[in-house]
Image (cartoon, rainbow, N blue to C red):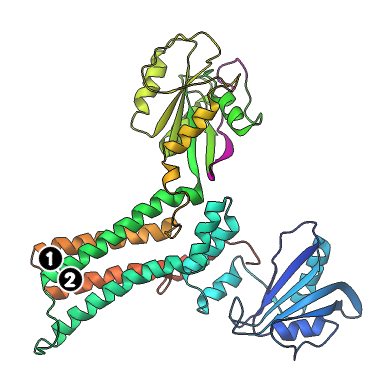
Amino acid sequence: MDETIVAISSALGEGAISIIRMSGKGAIKIISFVFSKNLSNAKSHTINYGYIMDGEEIIDEVLVTIMRAPKTYTKEDVVEINSHGSIATANKILEVLLNNGARRAEPGEFTKRAFLNGRIDLIQAEGVMDTINAETEQARKAAVQEITGNVTKMIEELRKMLLVLLSNIEVNIDYPEYEDIEIVTRKKIEKEIKQIEKKIYNIIEESENKKIIKEGIKVAIVGNPNVGKSSLLNTLIGEEKAIVTHKAGTTRDIVEGRILINGIIFNLYDTAGIRESQDIVEKKGIIKSKEKIKDADLIILVLDSSRKLSVADKKLLEETKNKKRIIVYNKKDKENKIDNICKGIYLSTKTKEGIKELKNEMTNIFNIGSFINKDFTYLSTARQINLLKEAQKISKEILKTIKENIEIDMIEIDIKLIIEKLDEIIGKSYKEELIEELFNQFCIGK
């Protein structure tokens, strides 16, 4: 990390201001080469007015912020240039800095340096990305808990409990002759591990429940041809996104839309009508529809209330019965010819009657109201949750081995394995390829 990196940190496009960020040992030296004033002795955390120069040519009138290590985002010397907001100006300043010794930053490299230099842990780094990507107020609040270290504290508490137990076991193994040490029995270990396993279980359950705050809910709108799936998607999102005709098989591919209900994003997928078809394009669309049904968090099964249930309708009812679903009886504005064999919502995409009830049910079925305004301290990524599940699996194995009277020193090894999993969550230990993959998901300049 001896190189000095630079990138445009603001979004490219027209705007009042662009921000070009530089970090590394040579940052202040490089800016002094190209600024109209010598900033080599400038005080830390000061803003300096002047011009970026390319030889004798003035590139732009700017404000340059000098931040000296270690009290910076990366714990290195950092320079931020506020220029006028055109793409051409920002790119020219970037070019001048590159020509004077800086290197173009890779995606997420500033945050990667903050992690590697010990300013933030891995959960906080992921929180930075979650803050950038937050699309709702709830997602923002959850990301803040990661950045401020509150999620890390939750994992650290588990580590502390395990480390205390581990140290007591090691003392008993290494110094059995000492009379004044606490004797660690299998019964005591079992009690402690049960308590830890319960805490892990609660964190996993809460995290998986609240993961929808960050990722949203995947909703597949399914049904047979011409029941009104595309019309329902258009009505829910308030725009004509899906093509609607009276001809069966109009929808050949997945059409997507998004709506926000009570602070939660619902990702809607209008699927091709499921039927037997000889059309090769429609057949591919039907295959994709079945994949979406399998992958969806929620199924909205649309039936046409103006006609009797068909064999195909009954087949879809059977195929989706074990999924979280809402049955919609569409075309309420017409004569009802269907038997309400399952509880559902009668509505009309034509008159909009029943749409409000459908939206309410979409939130009620996930019990969103029970947690939407509660504690936002939970794990938010699949990486974090999967590692904690691995830790939970090991803790269950320990409880099993205790009943089988396995030697305590073997239990000690498994406790260390749990600690290793927790260390991976917060980044106390990590694999280089994981770090590369994680930070490559960031935008350039962060």
Instruction: Tell me the quarter of the picture where residue 375 sits.
Output: bottom left
Q: Is residue 125 above or below residue 142?
A: below
Front residue of 214/357: it is 357
- Of the numbered discs in the image, which one, if any, rests on residue 402? 1
Callouts 1 and 2 close, C-beta under 8 Å: yes
The amino acid sitting under disc 2 is Ile
Residue 435 is one of the magenta-drawn residues: no
Residue 282: give x, y in percent of width and height: 53, 25
Side of 252 where 423 appears, left or right: left
The secondary structure that dominates the magenta segment is loop
Label 1, secondary structure: give it. Answer: helix
Evaluate whether residue 279 shows in this view: yes
Where residue 11 appears, x then y in whole percent?
Answer: 71, 59
Classed neighbour count for the residue bearing mark 1: other residues with Cα under 10 Å, few (<14), some (14–19), many (≥20): some
* Residue range corresponding to the magenta coloring: 245-264
Can you say whether 338 is above or below 120 in the image?
A: above
- Whether residue 251 is visible, yes or no, is no
Q: Is residue 40 above or below residue 128?
A: below
> Residue at (76%, 81%) from the top-left corner?
31
Residue labelled with disc 2: 411
Q: Disc 1 or 2, which lies upstream in sequence?
A: 1
Residue at coordinates 47% horizontally, 72% vertically from top-left?
121
Q: Is residue 429 left or right of residue 88?
A: left
